[in-house]
Amino acid sequence: MKTLQNIINGLNITQILGDHQHAMIASLEFDSRKVNVNDIFVALKGTQVDGHLYIDEVIEKGAKVIVCEVLPSNLHADVVYIQVEDTTIALGVLASNYYENPTKDLKLVGVTGTNGKTTTTTLLYQLFEKLGYPSVLVSTIRILINGDVYPTNNTTPDIVTLNRIFKEAVDRGCEYAFMEVSSHGIDQNRIAGLHYVVGAFTNITHDHLDYHKTFHNYIQAKKKFFDQLPETSYAISNLDDKNGRVMLQNTKAKKKFFTLKGDAEFKAKILESRLDGMLLDINKNELWTSLIGEFNAYNLLTVYAIAMLLGQDETEVLTSLSTLSNVDGRFQSFRTDAGAVVIVDYAHTPDALLNVINTIESIRTKNEQLITVVGCGGDRDKTKRPEMARIASSRSTLAIFTSDNPRSEDPEAILSDMEKGVEPQFFNRTLKISDRKEAIKTALKMSNKGDIILIAGKGHETYQEIKGERHHFSDVEIAHELSQQLNK
Ligand SMILES: CC(=O)N[C@H]1[C@@H](OP(=O)(O)OP(=O)(O)OC[C@H]2O[C@@H](n3ccc(=O)[nH]c3=O)[C@H](O)[C@@H]2O)O[C@H](CO)[C@@H](O)[C@@H]1O[C@H](C)C(=O)N[C@@H](C)C(=O)N[C@H](CCC(=O)O)C(=O)O
Ligand SMILES: Nc1ncnc2c1ncn2[C@@H]1O[C@H](COP(=O)(O)OP(=O)(O)OP(=O)(O)O)[C@@H](O)[C@H]1O
Ligand SMILES: N[C@H](CCC[C@H](N)C(=O)O)C(=O)O
Ligand SMILES: [Mg+2]
């Protein structure tokens, strides 16, 4: 049990009712379904429902403290009510206090941007572990605390989970923390109250307009992360992105930039590009990496720059960087038994798809086919669909449109949204096979030795969500399994 007084320290309170001096708290919750006796419940106005609707229910379950924006009309004498202006911000303060401000004891780096967050944070984590620092990673794929895996269901988890993870990391001796900061996370204040030493921006392109409505709002959501960084921290941004400067416009943090095309403190050039890796020049040092594609040159440059800002030794960083391997489901490739190359990539935005296809173009010869298997997620930004289909059909020898995670949507409806983007001269280059396994099978059957099969959109995911239900599904597993079957 913890004292309420400690937990509400620093909270911006509008009004407090009840005996708050003596209250003791068992646990901090914002979901009524998890509340138990003596808990503190924070009512959040969500995207689906308003948590204030559950106040009676949690009091019935024994909650002793309610934090809310609007006081309920029926007040209970033995309950403490704390009214605040914004419960999402309040939750940040409460969570930090509850877990004893763990991010003050960590060097926390946050990476935001449309693409490259998972890759950059995972490479940072791998680098710092190699350099001998126990670290923590919070990413779309997994949470890792010094090698131990914890499951996750959001790219940026809620602020209570984040503080709990960081507290455990501190207790286990971690020094560095690397986390993805999604635009949803920023917008919903899931990062409120965290202490960052570095904030990094990868890029911003088309995604999530279902949520943010306009590209302008999407930019502003990302920018809010940099606006909130303290003076003592660094804000580092991509100079080659149209909005790279805008991101840092109002930050109090020390500004830094990286570039592949212009001039900045951190610069890189691709000297050589092959199917098995790239030779890079980073700030006048040569670096061989097994990662490929221009976008990975950006990711590695970002990692190098952050390591320099964090005071690491340049030679050690470069040596370790060159030993890092790719992240699961990001340009993950293997050769089939029939001699074609399968590339599984998490490209689920038009820009990512274009980048991956450009990378493949730069290494494939003219007489090899590129067969792209791609779908678009349901209950997500619909305007991505025709764009991704247009890119896949105009840039591949054959594009097979299939299902990604249809979620609650009709798979056929998603496919017809995609088809609207195909330009008439490319109609004969497309096929529509809604069953993803069948689509992959067809791609494998139609391929010859040396051809490239790109399976885009799901990367590391090990499920497919259809009509709200998740079934086990892995592009990598299925492609391996089918490749063996077809070659028998
Ligand atoms: C649309 C969205 O972003 N939803 C996130 C949000 O939940 P919400 O606001 O929708 O919650 P809600 O259902 O309206 O409920 C409101 C409040 O009432 C509470 N409640 C609700 C029901 C009940 O019976 N009792 C109760 O107390 C809820 O616990 C909540 O506090 O806050 C939750 C806790 O932080 C998130 O887990 C949840 O993410 C959902 C699962 C999700 O799918 N989010 C996606 C869109 C997302 O956030 N993606 C980004 C990555 C995007 C990218 O860059 O690629 C991410 O960071 O994961
Ligand atoms: N720096 C980059 N710039 C553009 N595209 C990239 C970059 N890094 C990776 N990609 C492409 O975007 C895909 C997603 O990469 P990654 O998972 O690192 O991004 P993310 O920002 O974490 O995505 P999410 O928002 O889903 O968490 C990759 O599979 C690759 O195709
Ligand atoms: N973080 C992204 C992941 C998309 C992955 C793709 N496979 C899909 O299901 O749309 C999102 O939630 O929009
Ligand atoms: Mg990610």
Image (spheres, rainbow, N blue to C red):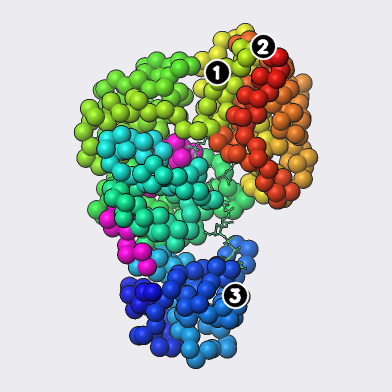
Q: Quadrant of residue 398?
A: top right
Badge 3 amino acid: Tyr
Q: Secondary structure at mark 3?
A: helix
> Where does residue 98 sit, x and y in percent of width and height?
37, 68
Instruction: Identify the residue at image location x=52%, y=40%.
Output: 205
Numbered tag placed on residue 267 in the rendering? none
Q: Dot 2, crowdedness within 10 Å: few (<14), some or many (≥20)?
A: some
Query: How far, Cα to Cα, is label 2 from label 3?
Result: 59 Å
Numbered tag placed on residue 448 in the rendering? 2
Query: How far, Cα to Cα, is label 3 from label 1?
Result: 54 Å
The reply to whether the magenta stretch includes residue 134 is no
Q: Is mark 3 within 8 Å of ligand 1?
A: yes
Please identify the quadrant where the C terminus is shown: top right
Of residue 28 and residue 264, the one placed in the foreground of this image is 28
Of residue 36 and residue 378, the one placed in the foreground of this image is 36
Q: Secondary structure at mark 1?
A: helix
> Where does residue 253 sit, x and y in percent of width and height?
29, 51
